[in-house]
Amino acid sequence: MVRRAECEAQARLARPTIPIVHEEAVVDRRALSAPADFDSELVVGVESSALGIAGYALVFGASVGRCYAAVFTTSVSGKEAAPEVAARLGLVVDRVLNLVRVRRVDERAPRRHLVVTPKAAPE
């Protein structure tokens, strides 16, 4: 089985822009049951940025021979930055990341409809 740390390392190698987790910025860290059959961890962080407040929700997961990574980032400036970042992070965690599922093979296969052209009737 691939380990979650290995999947995270692969994702960071492929996408160097994935936010670095600073422990002092973490507001939530927990196991996530989505997608099913993956050992996944969710990390949500919020920190100050040059533009205001930045937030991220990261999920790295591992299963037999498979890796999963989900990355959401947001930043907001202005007086209402903190509640807006919190609302965005809450929405993506509750309505996206908690509901992710891996499609079955039959769901991934293209569905082609067979079109049969009738033969012309003999004259």
Image (cartoon, rainbow, N blue to C red):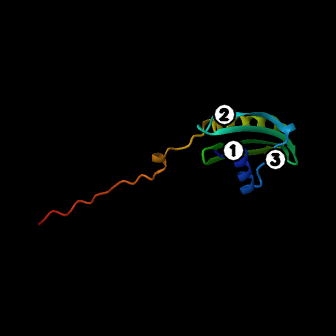
CA separation in Å, label 2 and label 1:
25 Å
Q: Is 5 on the left-hand or right-hand side of 21?
A: left
In the displayed image of the protein, which residue is found farthest to the left?
123
- Report x, y in % for residue 87: 74, 35
- Report x, y in % for residue 84: 77, 37
Helix, strand or loop status at disc 3: loop
Q: Which of pointers 1 and 3 indicates the residue nearer the eye? A: 1
Disc 2 residue crowd, few under 14, some 14–19, many 20+, Cα 10 Å: few
Residue at x 47% of width, y 46% of height: 107
Helix, strand or loop status at disc 1: loop
Q: Which mark is residue 94?
A: 2
Task: Choose top left, top right, bottom left or bottom right for residue 114.
Answer: bottom left
Q: Earlier in the sequence, mark 1 or mark 3?
A: 1
Q: Is 75 on the left-hand or right-hand side of 95?
A: right
CA separation in Å, label 2 and label 3:
22 Å
Q: Is 102 on the left-hand or right-hand side of 16?
A: left
- Report x, y in % for residue 102: 56, 43
- Report x, y in % for residue 47: 85, 41
Look at label 3 and name its amino acid.
Ile
CA separation in Å, label 1 and label 3:
19 Å
Q: Nearer the viewer, residue 112 or 64?
A: 64
Residue at x 71% of width, y 56% of height: 14
Look at label 1 and name its amino acid.
Arg
> What quarter of the picture does the N terminus occupy?
top right
Look at label 2 and name its amino acid.
Asp
Q: Which residue is mark 1?
A: 3
121, above or below 99, in the image: below
